[in-house]
Image (tube, rainbow, N blue to C red):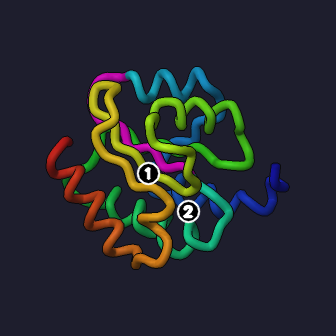
Amino acid sequence: MYPEYLVAPMREDLTKVGFEELKDADAVKHAIESEGTVFVMVNSVCGCAAANARPAARIAAANEKHPTKLVTVFAGMEKEAVDAARNYMLPYPPSSPAMALFKDGKLVHIIERHQIEGRPAQMIADNLIGAFEQYC
């Protein structure tokens, strides 16, 4: 677990553009299993989250066509919520950061850490926007 003062600005990177923070397993279940499309961002303190993942998520969320819900869980903070989100992302291994799109409770698109590291935010956002255009 990290000190809250450290992660607060990292949380705000997403909440200020409309992401809802999920803090427990029930909230994750309710969000992902709801009707429609849900974009889940597994946030992280790592450099690739700051430089690539969070900016990509913000860019993609601003797209005209985007998921019904934008939600986030924070790796290293709310363990129960993160574990629950990762269970929905199986068979993909745990990854932080990670981004997943669900439609009517089914995983339809995922971007893992190895697809985030070393890639510019716009390239990741374009990948997400393509998924949003297809599924939302």
The image quadrant where one finds the C terminus is: top left
Tag 1, which secondary structure?
strand
Where residue 67 appears, as percent x and y from the top left, is: 29, 43
Residue 24 sits above or below residue 17 on the image: above
Magenta: main secondary structure: strand
Numbered label attached to residue 99: 1
Residue range corresponding to the magenta coloring:
34-42
Q: What type is the residue that disc 1 sits on?
A: Met
C-alpha span from label 2 to label 1: 15 Å
Q: Residue at x 28, y 25 (%)?
A: 104
Horizontal arrangement in the rendering, residue 110 relative to residue 13 (left or right): left
Residue 86 sits above or below residue 45 on the image: above
Pointers 2 and 1 in contact (C-beta within 8 Å): no
Corner quadrant of residue 61: bottom left
Numbered label attached to residue 13: 2
Q: Residue at x 28, y 39 (%)?
A: 108
Where residue 12 appears, as percent x and y from the top left, is: 60, 58
Chain-order first, disc 2 or disc 1:
2
